[in-house]
Image (spheres, helix red, strand yellow):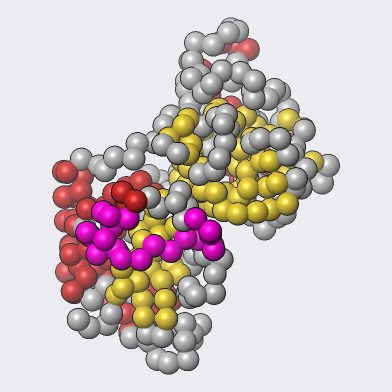
Amino acid sequence: MSGYQRMVSYLYRYDKGIKGKNTGYARIERNDRRCRVTIRLQDTVSVSPSVFFFIQNEGGMQRIPAGKLARNGSGFAGRVETPVDRMAGSEYAFDRIDGIYLSGPENVFYATTWKDITVSGAAPEKEADGWKAEDDRDDGNRSDAGSGSEESRPQAVNTASTEIRQESERAEPVQRRQDALDDALQAATGLEEASFAEASSVEACSRRERPDFGERMLSVFPKMYPFEIDEMGECVRIDLKDIGNLPVAYWSLAGNPFLLRGYYCYRHLIFACIGRQEYAVGVPGIYSEENSKWAKECRMLRFQPLSRVKDRHGAFGYWLIAVHAQE
């Protein structure tokens, strides 16, 4: 995929314009031609939220309708696919988009932005040119053959490029898992010194010296800031193949079924500092009794929500497994 980029942007609940708790995430994947956005929302909502891309202006927020989420267990999920140069059939390219907006109950909305901006405190009223909000339309089952002639509708909608579809929670096929395991082991056995750039100075997780592998991991891979608690230190985003950079004793994690399920659902893992000379690999997921039992069977003994919560059931966070320099 030429020019492929991927990022995760976290959704927050806005109540009467005030930013509140984290309620999910949006995963954005794009190349030179296409953009795919996967959304998961975990909050108490009775009606399927409408999805919009938004542009934040001084005079308000412009919204570009992109469909509705579908109910998925106790939350909602969906996926939007669109040409990168005409987001959801609009005249705006991806670079003009500031974030994603989800409708909510009265005085509530959800939003995420990947730019250094402040999301407008008021629910947006201004629509992008040529579009009309679709909050009161169908329940998410948008048909390619809608009303109106082909000429009167954006091509992106006709080709179902903005179709929302429910994301499966099931693990990928066995063969795909095996391929991923092979890739991870190949990356481990073929690891080159050049893959780790020696940093002249690294922000300390603690004042004590880190093991080489931990220092290198935290200095090389992309920084992430998912947690809103002081107990968690530095955190970086890693892929399945990057498990080969861990000590040999942990290479078997590439075949851990719970880790694979989380990776294929959310397309990333984390490597984090959790204390003095202590590190962990984190698997993204939503807390439930069933997930907790399976995680413990797979050596994921600790669940860390993104922020402090009274009830972790339904909370999004990371299942952690401690990683040491030597076993």
Left of 305 or right of it: where is 54? right
Q: Is residue 30 above or below residue 80?
A: below
Q: Is residue 291 left or right of residue 251?
A: right
Left or right side of 78 for 296: left
Q: Quadrant of residue 247?
A: bottom left
Which sits in the foreground, 201 or 276? 276
State the image coordinates of residue 297 (x, y, percent, origin top left): 22, 59
Q: Quadrant of residue 193?
A: bottom left
Q: Residue at x 56, y 18 (%)?
A: 138
Residue 121 appearing in the image: yes
Q: Magenta stretch: residue 198 in it?
A: no
User: 281 or 238, which is in the foreground?
Assistant: 281
**Res 66 seen here:** no
**Residue 227, above or below 50:** below
Which residue occupies 32% across, 80% down?
213
**Residue sitting at the far bottom:** 208
> Residue at horizontal 34%, vertical 40%?
169
Horizontal and vertical percent position of residue 207 = 47, 91
Image coords of residue 69 (percent x, y): 51, 32
Q: Position of residue 236 (x, y in %)?
A: 43, 67
Quarter that holds the C terminus: bottom left
298 drawn magenta? yes
The image quarter in which residue 210 lies: bottom left
What's the magenta region? Answer: 292-311
Above or below, 117 relative to 82: below
Q: Quadrant of the N terminus?
A: top left
**Residue at 44 percent of width and 51 percent of height:** 313
Total residue callouts: 0
Q: Is residue 185 above or below residue 115?
A: below
* 8 relative to 209 in the view: left or right: right
